[in-house]
Each structure stands twice: as C-alpha cells, then as structure tokens.
Amino acid sequence: MKNIIFMSEFLGLLFPRLCHACGRALFVHEPAVCSTCIHQLPRTKFHLDPESNADQIFWGRTRIEKASACFYYTRNSKVQKMIHDLKYRGHKKIGITIGELYGKDLKFSRFYRDINMIIPVPLHPGKKRKRGFNQSELIARGLSSALDKPVNTGILYRRAASQTQTRKSRYSRWKNVEGIFVVKSPKQLENKHILLVDDVITTGSTIESCANALHLSLIH
C-alpha cells in the first residue's frame, strides 16, 4: 500500500492533477475539486427552503413538489469552470463529485427523504454517442451513491435532438424542448417519488418538459 501511495504521489509530481475549480494541484484524496474550493463554492441551500428561487421558477408551470440547486452559477466563476470542464472537456469525475456533495446535503432535507428513483435528463442518443457520456447522468450517479437510491436511465427518452439552450430567450428555450421527451415504461413510475436531475437550471424549460412527460404518461 505504501508503495502504491508513493507511486501515486510521484506520478502527481510529473503529471499533476489540478482542481477543476481553482487550478491548484490536488492531493491524492481529492478526486476532482480541492477541499478548499468544496468549502468555498457558493451553495444555494435551496433544499432547506420550501419557497426557494428554484421552486418559484416552476410555480404555475408544472407539478414539481420541490426544486433545488447545488450551487449558484455565474459567468467566469469556479462553478462555470467546473461545468465546462465536465461537459466540454470530458472530466467525468466532476459530475460524480458534484452529485456526491449535493447528495450529502439532501440527506438533511425532509423533501428528499422518500425518494424512490433518480432520473437524469436524457441526451439525444446521437449527442450522447458524440460526447461519450451524459453529464446529468454522472451527477445522478453521484447522488445515487450518497443517497443510496437507484438511478433509472431507461424510462425517460429524448426522441428529438434539440439545439443548445445557450443564449436563447425564455420562450425560445421552452419551444426548443417542448414535447421532445417520452416515457417508455410508465408503470414503473406509479406511486414513485422521482428526483429529476439536470446539470444547469436557467429558465427550467428542460426540467418542465421532462416533468410534463412523466405526468402525462401516468394519465394515459
């Protein structure tokens, strides 16, 4: 074991692993983000607030019991750097790390105690093949590890490829994802408390479209 640790530290000197938030060298026990950044990143604590800003996004739009977000996302911030490194540079450990961090927070919220299933927002199959992974699924895997709840990637399906939501207006974002999600096995959803997971929430259009598809599948 000592030899393995020594070799890891030696390789770290030659090829240092860097924190995806601040850029400093990581210690062996730090998978993707340094301990300092983990404590300094801007947590929202929305999971403790029954009327958080995230909840208010969906009021009057769709039936969502509770909405939360792990971090505040602002331009040129550490959080933006982490998300960009995850989505566009393929650093998958970031997604797992974010999920595990937030899962530990959600354990202390009464809104998430009876979760039965975690469903990540799906990518279109073509886009997933091109990227090689679904960043929301990685976050969901981290949440699953912390919350000890199963992830289901076979129920919700994106039947049409959508354009990127970046720089779109609120209405354009909604139209861009309207009706593009379908449910394959609605019986698996009966009497279930579902945790929907996306990497970034701006206007909430993607989550709204997913939630509507899940609700409609139980009506028909």
Image (cartoon, rainbow, N blue to C red):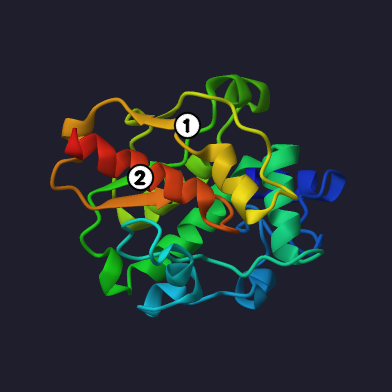
Residue at 48%, 66% (x, y): give it. 57
Decide which of 83, 36 is in the foreground and name it: 83
Q: Contact (CB < 8 A) between labels 1 and 2?
A: no
- Helix or strand or loop: what does disc 1 sit on? loop
* Circle number at residue 212: 2
Q: Residue furthest right?
A: 14
Residue at 74%, 61% (x, y): give it. 21
Q: Residues within 10 Å of mark 2 (few under 14, many from 20)?
A: some
Instruction: Answer left or right for 30 relative to 120.
Output: right
In the image, what residue type sits under mark 1? Ile
Residue at 58%, 31% (x, y): give it. 133
Q: Position of residue 29 (x, y in %)?
A: 60, 58
- Helix or strand or loop: what does disc 2 sit on? helix
In this rendering, the answer to whether 128 lies above or below 9 is: above
Q: Which residue is mark 1?
A: 180
In this rendering, the answer to whether 185 lies above or below 189 is: above
Q: Quadrant of residue 210?
A: top left
Residue at 50%, 74% (x, y): give it. 53
Q: Position of residue 165 (x, y in %)?
A: 66, 44
